[in-house]
């Protein structure tokens, strides 16, 4: 009964910034954990960042220090602020809701996935 919807993807030059948003329709973000994953061509889907149900924030090593995950004031949208983007950040970014996160490398994704938004970083 929760449908995450991503927005904010696009084309950006290396070193630039992009802001992704995920709105979870049907329930507020305070009710469940929300996270971001991405999948590049020829690669498996990988974890990017997440906000646990208790509010703790986790990041993959590849994005730590460059990306920031946060929730908006409405408590129904999670935002991924992406700075210092690199070509290797190019991927389809997916929002996930209802997961369990212990660290950037220990987690269980939830059952609710968005359709994804394309992020392309040119060199």
Image (tube, rainbow, N blue to C red):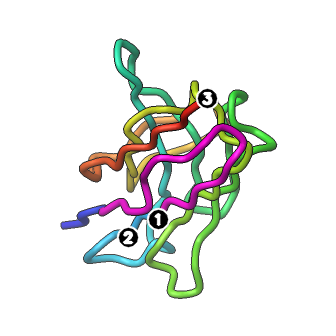
Dominant secondary structure, magenta: strand
Q: Nearer the viewer, residue 1 or 35?
A: 35
> Which residues fall within the magenta stretch?
5-20
Answer yes or no: do the residues labelled 2 and 1 have beta carbons within 8 Å?
yes
Q: Position of residue 121 (x, y in %)?
A: 54, 37
**In terms of sequence position, does the residue under pointer 1 or pointer 3 come before the other?**
1
**Helix, strand or loop for disc 2:** strand
Farthest residue toward the left? Answer: 1
Secondary structure, mark 1, is: strand
* Label located before the other in sequence (3 or 2): 2
Give the labeled residue for mark 1. Answer: 21
Quick check: 105 above or below 116?
Answer: above
In the picture, measured across the screen, residue 71 lies left or right of residue 1, that is right
Q: Disc 3 designates what residue?
A: 123
Which disc is residue 23 wearing?
2
Contact? badges 3 and 2 (CB < 8 Å): no
| Residue 49, picture quadrant | top right
Foreground of the two, 85 or 98: 85
Residue at figure coordinates x 38%, y 45% from the top left: 94
């Amino acid at each position: 009964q929760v449908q995450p919807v991503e927005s904010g993807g696009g084309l950006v030059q290396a070193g630039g910034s992009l802001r992704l948003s995920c709105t979870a329709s049907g329930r507020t973000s305070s009710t469940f954990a929300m996270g971001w994953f991405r999948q590049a061509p020829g690669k498996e889907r990988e974890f990017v960042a997440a906000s646990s149900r208790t509010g703790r924030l986790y990041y993959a090593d590849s994005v730590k220090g460059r990306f920031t995950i946060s929730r908006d004031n409405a408590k129904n949208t999670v935002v991924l602020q992406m700075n210092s983007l690199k070509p290797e950040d190019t991927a389809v970014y997916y929002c996930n809701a209802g997961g369990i996160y212990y660290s950037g490398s220990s987690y269980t994704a939830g059952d609710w996935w968005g359709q994804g938004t394309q992020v392309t970083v040119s060199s």
